[in-house]
Image (cartoon, grey):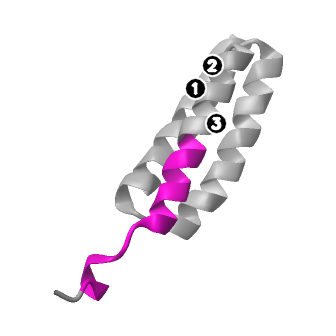
Amino acid sequence: MINKTARTRLRSQLKKLRTLIASGAEEEARQALTATITIIDKSITKGVIHKNAAARLKSRLSRQVNALALKVPASTNSS
């Protein structure tokens, strides 16, 4: 039962972060990333996910959030 609660919390936070990334909300995504990484780390200690899977998740999510900063808004693109 404990693992189910932790897994649900992890999945919900991942979904929230991925939604923010998809919407392009950079600042909110950065804040959610720190909260997500904390939950991922807690999931490792509880045995919900493997440490390598967690490292992979954190790496991929960090890359996606950092890519938001590099995107140029369409409204400032002058052609």
Instruction: Please tell me which residue is depicted at 30% across the width and 87% down the height of the picture.
Output: 76
Q: In the image, residue 60 lies at what x, y percent?
A: 54, 37
Whether residue 15 appears in this view of the structure is yes
Which secondary structure is most common in the magenta stretch? Answer: helix
| CA distance for labels 1 and 2 | 17 Å
Disc 2, SS: helix
**Magenta span of residues:** 61-77
Mark 3 is on which residue type?
Answer: Lys
Decide whether residue 69 is among the magenta residues.
yes
* Callouts 1 and 2 close, C-beta under 8 Å: no
Residue 8: assigned label = 1
| Label at residue 53 | 2
- Placement of 64 over or under 6, stated as above or below: below
Name the front one of labels 1 and 3: 3
The residue that mark 3 highlights is: 58
From the viewer's perspective, is 58 left or right of 42? left
Residue at position x 45%, y 45% from top? 18
Residue 10, horizontal then vertical, whole percent = 61, 31
